[in-house]
Amino acid sequence: MPGRVPRVVRTPAIVLRHRRLGEADRIVTLLTPGRGKIDVIAKGVLRARSRMAGHLEPLTLVEVVLAHGRSMDVVTQAQTIDAFPAAHDDLDRLSAAMYLLELADRITVEHADAEGLHDLLHVALVRLARGDGQQVVTRTFELALLDATGFRPELTACLRCSMPVAAEAAWWAPAEGGVMCASCARAHQDAQPIDATALRVLRAFQTQTYEEAGRIRLTDELAARMEQAMHALMRAVVERDLKSAQFVSAARRARVAGEGIEAAIDAARDTAGDDEE
Amino acid sequence: MHRVNDGHAPFLPGASSPIARLVEAFHRLPGIGPKSAQRLAYHILRAPEAEAQELADALVEVKRSIVFCAQCQNLTSRTPCDICSDGSRDHHSICVVEEPLDVLAIERTGGFGGVYHVLHGVISPADGVGPEDLKIGELLARLRDVETEVSEIIVATNPNLEGEATAMYLARLLRPLGIRVTRLARGLPAGADLEYADDVTLSRALEFRQEVQ
């Protein structure tokens, strides 16, 4: 039987992650503009002389040529478009980038149309790599991602009684997807009080442009509170722990650990992290 | 249905038969597919009983006698391991690696005379591995407890996203302690072709270029 001519597709893609397949191959998870998230096979990339390996590392925007395979497409060529080198030079930026990749991976279903997502992730990675504040980049990405996937959180009206909630009186209910008023929150076990300033800034991030959001000054403490609230929300949306979110917190703890080996040991061993509290 | 014709034709064993169990056990090993698992199982079947016994004994013994070295966390039959208890090695410099096999790779070069620390993994959120799952706390405790002052930590994790994140995380923890933290140089492998090198590798190779001797 004559073999079918393989269908070849050329597409840009962001490498989200990869896992080992057999002795020398990898299954690479790509986020493409046209075909959404796809798993493809990269043959021989674990060999030292592979010409593609360096181009198919996570946190790389590549142009790939894919040959149609039986169960999965096979990468026949890969060329880096942008490796976001500056995102690799700083632990806070790198951990934030890993978090963005994991979020994009966990929230998408394979082959679902994700044109918007590829662009959202690309823009966020470019901003991280050029040195924009990682808190602003991460929070605006989370909110835009939730919008794009239909999980837009309710930040102004109570999720139960629909009455507008003042930031000072708001409770945070991640499992429900937003805020509740104090009286509705009483009947809801998971709801926690949320810092009023943190909520106001999140509201601003949800409605303003990125440039406007970037002008808001965030103290470390405020940023940490917003991070805690959004990590809890994202965990509820993807219905699992996000290890990279915990790593973002661990990296920060290591930065503020202070002098001395005991402080370092505490920072390294504090597995619960402020995410879990 | 296969017929037994020469004593070792591969007739299909039932799921609960000893052969099926052996095939299944081999299949669970990394890099062994169903066909290789069958081949290995039938090789054992044909081999003399002594050879099979030797393999079985070796498997049981390795699980019973191999422990983590109390210092470097490498796998060893006695703790501290041969490398950690070798007085001729330089205990001022510790090379941090991901896996025990990396120790063998660096030892093979003969170019490193210090001691090691094995993390048993690398920070990889995508695979659910965080810093708390590695032997990082053990490394810090070791720095606190050893008599010899450690002057340099060479982070020899792999040059990929996870390896970089692990290296930077370690550096962030260790720098405030006044310890010099270095990273293996990153550049072109022997036999490489510039045309096919990725941008990150090529730019690092340029950055860390050296004078031609």
Image (cartoon, rainbow, N blue to C red):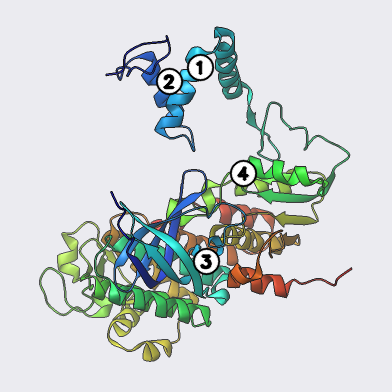
Q: Earlier in the sequence, mark 1 or mark 2?
A: 2
Q: How much space separates mark 4 and mark 3, taking CA atoms?
A: 24 Å
Between circles 1 and 4, the one closer to the viewer is 1
Give the chain of mark 3.
A
Chain name for mark 1: B
Q: Are marks 4 and 2 on the same chain?
A: yes
Which dot marks residue A55?
A: 3
Q: Is residue A28 left or right of residue A35?
A: right
> What label sits on residue B99 in the rendered view?
4
**What residue is drawn where x is 57% and y is 68%?**
A91
Q: Mark 1 Cα within 10 Å, few/some/many (few <14, many 20+)?
A: some
Q: Do residues under tags 2 and 3 come within 8 Å of each other at their CB atoms?
A: no
How far apart are labels 1 and 4 at the CA level?
Answer: 30 Å
Tell me the amino acid under the disc marked 1: Ile
Q: Give the chain letter at badge 2.
A: B
Q: Secondary structure at mark 3?
A: helix
Secondary structure under the numbered disc 2 in the rendered image:
helix
Circle 2 packing at 10 Å, graded few (<14), some (14-19), many (20+), is some
Q: Quadrant of residue A14?
A: bottom left
Indicate the position of residue B10 as horizontal and vertical percent values.
38, 18
Three-letter code, disc 4: Glu
- Along the line of sight, the residue nearer the viewer: A189 or B52: B52
- Asked whether residue A274 is in view, the answer is no
Q: Which residue is mark 2?
A: B22
Q: Is residue A185 above or below residue B44?
A: below
Q: Which residue is mark 1?
A: B44
